[in-house]
Image (cartoon, rainbow, N blue to C red):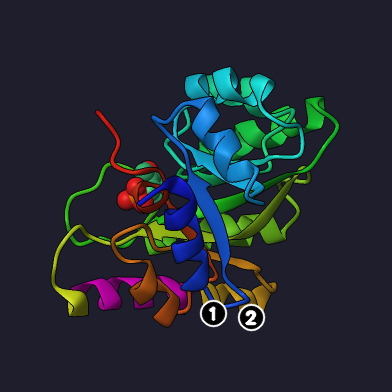
Amino acid sequence: MSIEQNYQDILSQLPQNVKLVAVSKNHPSEKIKEVYDLGQKVFGENKVQELLEKQPVLPNDIEWHLIGHLQTNKVKYIAGFVAMIESVDSEKLLKEIDKEAAKSNRKINVLLQVKIAKEETKFGLTIDEAKAIFEEYLLETFPNIEIKGLMGMASFVDDESQIREEFSILKNLFDELSQLKPLETLSMGMSGDFPLAIESGSNSVRVGSAIFGERNY
Ligand SMILES: *Cc1c(COP(=O)(O)O)cnc(C)c1O
């Protein structure tokens, strides 16, 4: 199928309230422009270097989401334009984003990335760490940051019940934190599992290969 067919196919599967982040990592700017021209405005990249190469050559109204692990020393390169950092996995990183947001005279939207997969994953906060950071945030500790919600990835397994269980952990935390301060975004679901994620309460899916095709790593 063509990129256009893939894209329309994904859109047709998303309920009205679910936002699509088109994950364009490892794909060239021309392909991104193709999807942009179909009406897509939100794109996700996982590497700062790649984002910095693409952002200047693509339209200004693209909302760039950073979805991969972010080193503190690289925050300054994207602080001026990034629409959302979905992968906040430490308090140290949050502090750095807050500092760089202030320098850029803007507020930066972020999601806390929570480790929900049973399998060993490198990045992501534990539930307790995420709660602790959110409580600090409520004390106005990070005035230049808006925590908009949570992001998580389920295990790469075929067992649907395990995937559902992992998504429901994040949904429960989302509901719990939303009682302290309403949250907007629950980012879960990728090409392989977004229908399950939506059933589990996701309202933002990050879809790459199902739109752009397989990546060559
Ligand atoms: C690559 C990536 C995706 C998209 O994965 P696909 O399987 O290609 O849809 C989503 N989220 C994160 C954090 C990623 O790194």
Magenta segment: 162-173
* Residue 175, disc: 1
Give the camera-side residue of 25 and 76.
25
Q: Amino acid at mark 2?
A: Gln
Q: Position of residue 105 (x, y in %)?
A: 86, 31
User: Which circle, 1 or 2, is nearer the viewer?
Assistant: 1
- Residue 167: in magenta span: yes
For residue 210, side relative to residue 5 (left or right): left
Residue located at (34% from left, 57% from top): 191
Q: Position of residue 21 (x, y in %)?
A: 54, 52
- Classify the position of the C terminus by image quarter: top left
On the image, numbered disc 2 is attached to which residue? Answer: 179
Disc 1 from disc 2: Cα separation: 7 Å
User: Are the residues tagged 1 and 2 within 8 Å (C-beta)?
Assistant: yes
Q: Quadrant of residue 58?
A: top right
> Residue at the right extreme?
105
> Residue at the left extreme?
158
